[in-house]
Image (cartoon, helix red, strand yellow):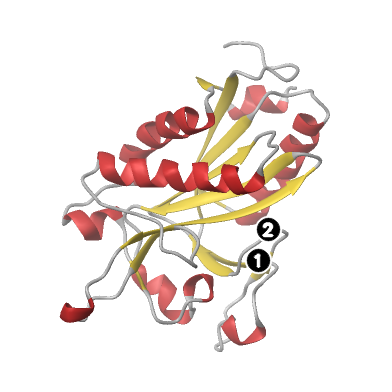
Amino acid sequence: MRPIHGDDPHALAIVRLGVDVPYEQAWSLQRWVHGKRAAGELTDTVLILEHAPVYTAGKRTAPHERPSDGTPVIDVDRGGRLTWHGPGQLVAYPIVGVTDVTAYACRLEDTMIQVCADFGVTARRVPGRGGVWAVGDAALGLPDRQLGAVGLRVARGVTMHGFALNCANDPRWFNRIAPCGLPDVGVSSLSAETGRRIVVEEVIPIAEKRLAEALGREPFDLHEEDLLRR
């Protein structure tokens, strides 16, 4: 294990938190790591996980976008709107120093686009929409389908939150909401697009590699227990 004290501009610590991680637990850990990173006590760090099922609302979420059946929603301090996280979806929370937030968001989208390509899925940006998409075909009645989303917060020059890429999640979780405030689009996953089950565990090492490449960092593994000792 390499040392992670201070701001090593070339390093990216990768911390795998596992599956069924409660949202509030990961959010609390993000805030702790963010404080350490902003103080120069940790290098850039990314938390990789699958959440227990949860709906979260970013700052731009409108009242009518919330579930009408009383489904609980956690209000969070990221940008963006309403979305879902849960089993079968890879979530990455890079806590890294940035100077250009727009360019950074594009790097996260580039990461997901490249990961999709690694599994034989063509994903791209759609003007006016965040995230990455499998483009539909109007002639066939096939809508654009969101494969991954980005939601960010930047404070003291350091990011929180990050991206979520659908791998093998049940799309019915999105039926209660308009994902990211977009009612006329679909939601898909790597599994649905390829016709074979692609689980998060299979995607994680590729996503870690592509994220490190997009950020220009050298990745190394760090256990959660070792992180918390810092």
Vertical comparison of 148 with 225: above or below:
below
Quote the CA–CA distance across marks 2 and 1: 5 Å
Q: Can residue 19 be spotted in the picture?
A: no
Ranked by sequence position, the earlier of labels 2 and 1 is: 1
Q: Which numbered disc covers residue 128?
A: none
Q: Which three-letter amino acid code belongs to the residue tagged 1? A: Gly
**Total marks drawn?**
2
Seen in the image, is 2 located left or right of residue 31? left
Which residue does the image show at 68% across and 50% down from the upper left? 27
Residues at marks 2 and 1 touching, judged by CB atoms closer than 8 Å: yes
Spot occupied by residue 117 in the image (x, y as percentages of width and height) = 27, 43
Task: Give whichever of 85, 209 is nearer the camera.
Answer: 209
For label 2, the SS is: loop
Vertical comparison of 11 with 187: above or below:
above
Which residue does the image show at 34% across and 65% down from the upper left? 170
Which residue does the image show at 48% across and 33% down from the upper left? 214
Question: Which residue is label 2 attached to?
Answer: 78
Q: Quadrant of the N terminus?
A: top right
Q: Quadrant of the C terminus?
A: top right
Residue 148 figure quarter? bottom left
Label 1 packing within 10 angstroms: few (<14), some (14-19), many (20+): many
Q: Which three-letter amino acid code belongs to the residue tagged 2? A: Arg
Q: Can residue 173 be spotted in the picture?
A: yes
Vertical comparison of 157 with 85: above or below:
above
Spot occupied by residue 112 in the image (x, y as percentages of width and height) = 40, 46
Seen in the image, is 23 located left or right of residue 179? right
Seen in the image, is 194 located left or right of residue 22? left
Seen in the image, is 186 located left or right of residue 160? left
Label 2 packing within 10 angstroms: few (<14), some (14-19), many (20+): many
Question: Which residue is label 1 attached to?
Answer: 58
Spot occupied by residue 160 in the image (x, y as percentages of width and height) = 67, 46
For label 1, the SS is: loop
